[in-house]
Amino acid sequence: MTPSNSNAPSCDFCYVPLQSVPMFQLENLEHNHKLYERVKDMATRKGYTTSQLALAWVHHQGNNVCPIPGTTRIQNLEQNINALDVKLTAEEMVELDEIASLVRGDRYGPEMATWRHEETPPLSSWKVDA
């Protein structure tokens, strides 16, 4: 993903085009790419990938939070597991929290508006009398 592209990035595995996701629209892309570079620099300094650092950041949010990454490659699975080795200082957590708060554009496009912040309906409501 580079902000110099004339089009927003594409995504081979996404259900909706990334161009419809506000954080990846061109007006937000350059700003968000600079934030990504800050995360990448921290990951490089620590000897990890940006994905490992991101998973570690989520993991360090507390005992009631667990990242659930998806992958289709064994190499990525191994990297995800190794993210458990990443130790973040309080200062690094503050920096990553700050970076996350500065991201421009919503994570979801308008297609997801009705799903956000919704509670899962009880299982009993899913059953249909035959």
Image (cartoon, rainbow, N blue to C red):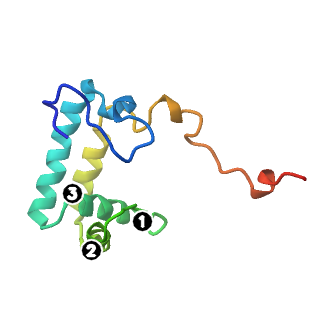
Q: Disc 2 marks which amino acid?
A: Asn
Mark toward the viewer: 1 or 2: 2
Front position in the image: 19 or 72: 72
Vertical order, 37 against 42 (above or below): above
- Residue at point 45%, 41% (across, down): 15
Quadrant occupied by the N terminus: top left
Give the mark nearest the N terminus, 1 or 2. 1
Q: Which image quadrant for residue 77? A: bottom left
SS category of the residue bearing label 3: helix
Q: Is residue 50 left or right of residue 45?
A: right
- Residue at point 38%, 48% (across, down): 13
Q: Which image quadrant for residue 74? A: bottom left
Q: Which image quadrant for residue 71? A: bottom left
Q: Tag on residue 27? A: none
- Name the residue beneath numbered marker 2: 82
Expressed as whole percent of the image width and height from the top left, the position of residue 35 reads 19, 42
Q: CA distance from mark 1 to mark 2?
A: 18 Å
Expressed as whole percent of the image width and height from the top left, the position of residue 93 reads 26, 58
Q: Is residue 100 left or right of residue 126?
A: left
Give the mark nearest the N terminus, 1 or 3. 3
- Name the residue beneath numbered marker 3: 50
- Name the residue beneath numbered marker 1: 62
Expressed as whole percent of the image width and height from the top left, the position of residue 48 reads 17, 66
